[in-house]
Image: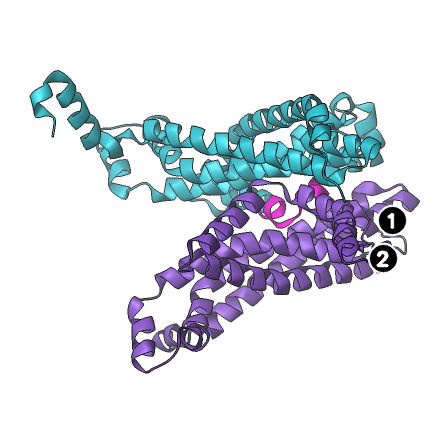
Amino acid sequence: MSWDWSIIWQYLPRLLDGALLTLELVAISGLIGIALAVPLALLRVSPNPWVRALPFAYIFFFRGTPLLVQIFLIYYGASQFEAVKQSVLWNLLSEPYWCAIIAFSMNTAAYSAELIRGAIQAIPRGEIEAAEALGMSKPLQVRRIVLPRAFGIVLPAYGNELILMLKGSSLASTITLLDLTGMARTIIARTYTPLEIFFAAGMIYLLISACFIGGFRLLERRLNRYQHYRHHIAHEMTEVDPRLQD
Amino acid sequence: MDLQGFGHLLVSGAWVTLQLALASLFVGLIFGLIGASAKLSRFRFARWLGTLYTTFVRGIPELLLVLTIYFGGSMLLMGIGSWFGYDEYIEISAFVAGVAALSVAFGAYATEVFRAAIQELPKGQWESAYALGMTRRKTFFRIILPQVWRLALPGLGNLFQVLLKDTALVSVVGLDELMRQAYVASGYTKEPFTFYMAAAFIYLGLTVIATCITMLLERASNPAARGARA
């Protein structure tokens, strides 16, 4: 067995092309996923059991089945119905790219909705009561108090979800997309150097998750800055007056 | 749901899926225990190895792991074989590659669960065992591990759910498990939606059963809480 570094350098540009598609898939489905997750989470905490049932069933299905099944259901499954094939939806559903986006968005929406629900329920009761005491209407409470607080609470957990989604996006390669994993598989089919190319692809995935983790640390400091308040003030005071240092 | 006589295919696939999941669980738990011991070791090198393992494996997709072990594993084994003068062709079966990949992934996450559980135990448990003259190893197996089990169960239950769903990835390298059988059946009948939906419901059933078993085990492992409730 020989290890060939030059093959990695030779194909690195193509792997990076694949990584770009991976990032694109994660970013677009992440945004659609959050847009779906917020209403799902709000319905999920409704006091009415009938309203709660629908998001519950959705979340139960998408969290209880493999992502691969969900992708295949959309990509292969949709073609079973003539009605779908005749409709405008077919423009989307005949494209592997959009099938992957739809499947990833629906999947991550289920997981994120559960995270947001947990965060909403973790908001201290008194903050909601305070908003009520100020005479805020329900929608205003949700917009000004509940959601901003929930986003701050959910952020660390959402960072994990994003990394899981990054890893899940490798399944796009099973429906012919040339994402990072798909690109690696095509290169290997030509060169037959699975160890080198999969190693390089793995390193790129690691690098991307490291960037995500770093980015989320920064975002968390910003959204939860009240937790760093004291530190922040102390820092500003030393800027005003150097004698206050130490 | 009309399965047109392909139901038995799905059942046999589900059986392979279950075998794959249980085999990977068993090997993965061993990896997890080794990983946790490494991360809590006195030796810096062992701690470094443990961190390397969890960082790498948790950062790369499970599918990539399956593909690497299936396609790269035989190359690696043949390379090692040739050092020892064995030059025959070695092939790894899809099942073995699947168990290897899934248990490596499960082990990395289980390492963190076990590590947290071991650290959660009061230090006095170790100290009193030492005071009784037990060795470090004996303390670990007789005193610590039985208690860690209880603390780690909820986390391990979640990981097993993930593992069950990840078994679907092994269909990509051609193992005849549930997903692959659904693919075969939908190829014959031209009804992919029906068969993937049937597969989805079988997976759903399996995850529900796994949740119930975890809950039963949690009850069984915590007699103190049961007594308090009664």
Kindly report the secondary structure that dominates the magenta region of the rendered protein: helix
| Magenta stretch contains residue A69 | yes
Q: In this structure image, what is the colour of chain A?
A: cyan
Residue that carries the numbered disc 2 in the rendered image = B9
Q: Residues within 10 Å of mark 1 (few under 14, many from 20)?
A: many
Q: Nearer the viewer, residue A129 or B13?
A: B13
Quadrant in which the C terminus of chain B is drawn: bottom left
* Amino acid type assigned to the residue bearing label 2 in the image: Leu
- For image coordinates 55% across by 29% down, the residue present is A30
| A88 sits left or right of A56 in the view | right
* Amino acid type assigned to the residue bearing label 1 in the image: Ala
Residue A91 in the image, given as x and y percentages of width and height? 77, 21
- For image coordinates 42% across by 58% down, the residue present is B43
Q: Is residue B84 above or below residue A5?
A: below
| Magenta stretch contains residue B189 | no
Which residue range is magenta in the image?
A60-70
Can residue B88 be spotted in the picture?
Answer: yes
> What chain is colored purple?
B
Q: Is residue A27 above or below residue B134?
A: above
Image quadrant in which you'd find residue B20: bottom right
Residue that carries the numbered disc 1 in the rendered image = B185
Q: Nearer the viewer, residue B9 or A2?
A: A2
Q: Label 1 lies in what chain? A: B
Q: Label 2 lies in what chain? A: B
Residue contact between numbered discs 2 and 1, judged by CB atoms under 8 Å: yes
Residue B28 in the image, given as x and y percentages of width and height? 60, 60
On whether disc 2 and disc 1 are found on a single subunit, the reply is yes
Can residue B202 be spotted in the picture?
Answer: no
| A49 sits left or right of A179 in the view | left
Image quadrant in which you'd find residue A119: top left
Residue A243 in the image, given as x and y percentages of width and height? 7, 22
